[in-house]
Amino acid sequence: MKTTGRLSKANRQQKLLDLLDNDPFVTDEDLADKFFVSIQTIRLDRLELGIPELRERVKKVAEKNYQKVRSIVGTEIIGELIDLSLGERGISILETTPDMAFSKTNIVRGHHIFSQAESLAMSVIDAEVALTGVSNIKYLSPVQAGDKMVAKAEVVRVRGNKHFVHVKIHVNQNQVFRGKFILIAIHSREV
Amino acid sequence: MKTTGRLSKANRQQKLLDLLDNDPFVTDEDLADKFFVSIQTIRLDRLELGIPELRERVKKVAEKNYQKVRSIVGTEIIGELIDLSLGERGISILETTPDMAFSKTNIVRGHHIFSQAESLAMSVIDAEVALTGVSNIKYLSPVQAGDKMVAKAEVVRVRGNKHFVHVKIHVNQNQVFRGKFILIAIHSREV
DNA sequence: TTGTAATTAGTACCTGATACTAATATAAAG
DNA sequence: CTTTATATTAGTATCAGGTACTAATTACAA
């Protein structure tokens, strides 16, 4: 045994897996140094273990986290309000983009659709602030990134501070979503 | 030569910035094709604009959010995943902040609650990508900004690629949300 | 027409690999 | 001790997606 910290093959490969699992940003060269073996050994190990090369690993991590960066925090109304009759109806449009979708399938994540619908429903009732009490929603077909979602909201009934709003979202004449929202208007003194 | 879609330098560089801003995963070659110029022109543009090469861009995206997600694999999740049994159940925590709430009432907007629930539901099923098919949700009481929302998801039934997941969210022992999600798993194809 | 900016072409080199061949070291078995 | 199997190392050619640089060509405006 020449070099001090030398491990058995199986042992090394297990540690390799662990190591790359919580730090994918390591080159073969780094690994070779770490395990006191040649770079070729590391490559054989990766081959046997089915671990992709550094650049692939980094790319995967990047893709995975990419969508998350642009989340839907903060925006008052999601989509562009293009028509509004307070207390009656409203229309909003949301152009979907790749960052709203799953990278692999290009299908827009549900909460973006929901958010457009809910925020339109809230805009449409004639009250300063509203809270969604109950809602019953259905996604009818997937939305592709790039699709333009047209949401139409209609106030169907008002009982006290409860507002019943139906929202339908279409993409090119095809309905992709419908939802029934019961929104509770809150008066400022209420907590 | 007057190749059809040719733009002025300034124009092209502006579009280049925009383009890379919401999709950093593009090679110089792709860009050259897109703008009908040579690869060298693109490289001059990047040089002038101080845009790093593809691999650097990808690496930055990967590093940006890496620390946050490192423990769990494949989670684009809203909130922090603190427990997960794939295919069975999961728990996530989301600390709400004022920017998630209505400024007047300090009440957290519904779609943040929904998003936490939906993304937890998606995390919990043992499939790479899922699409929310139908969901039935109910907000039980308002959430104040600053509240810590604890979401618990449970897979109650699996039929083919349909996964029925119940999610409950609590704030200090009080249930504030419940939802039944039917998630449709999509089998991943290689990219 | 001429001068300048913009674009293109081409070369050498870089990193972090793959894919392959061949040689050598080490350990176990006969 | 020798043979054999396994593990490791060495070395070469090739790749993608670049950098860095030089030189030539094209576009356009004065």
Image (spheres, coloured by chain):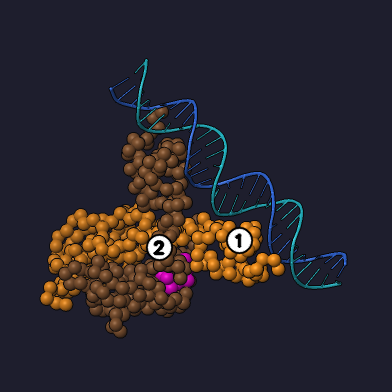
Chain colours: A orange, B brown, C cyan, D blue
Location of residue A77 in the rendering, given as x and y in whole percent from the top left corner: 23, 61
The reply to whether callout 2 and callout 1 are in contact (CB within 8 Å) is no
Separation of marks 2 and 1 at Cα, in angstroms: 27 Å
Task: Farthest residue to the bottom: give it.
Answer: B173
Check disc 1: other Cα within 10 Å, few if <14, some if 14-19, many if 20+.
some
* Residue displayed at 46% across by 61% down: A61
Please determine if labels 2 and 1 lie on a single subunit.
no
* Residue displayed at 31% across by 60% down: A175
- Circle 1 sits on which residue? A32
Amino acid type indicated by mark 2: Asn
Amino acid type indicated by mark 1: Ala
Q: Is residue A52 visible?
A: no
Q: Nearer the viewer, residue A115 or B156?
A: A115
Asked whether, in this view, residue B121 is left or right of residue A90, the answer is right
Write down the quadrant of residue B141 in the picture. Answer: bottom left
SS state under label 1: helix
Location of residue B158 in the rendering, given as x and y in whole percent from the top left corner: 46, 75
Chain of the residue that carries numbered disc 2 in the rendered image: B
Asked whether, in this view, residue A36 is left or right of residue D16, the answer is right
* Residue displayed at 18% across by 64% down: A124
| Residue range highlighted in magenta | B121-128
- Circle 2 sits on which residue? B65
Q: Is residue B180 above or below residue B55?
A: below
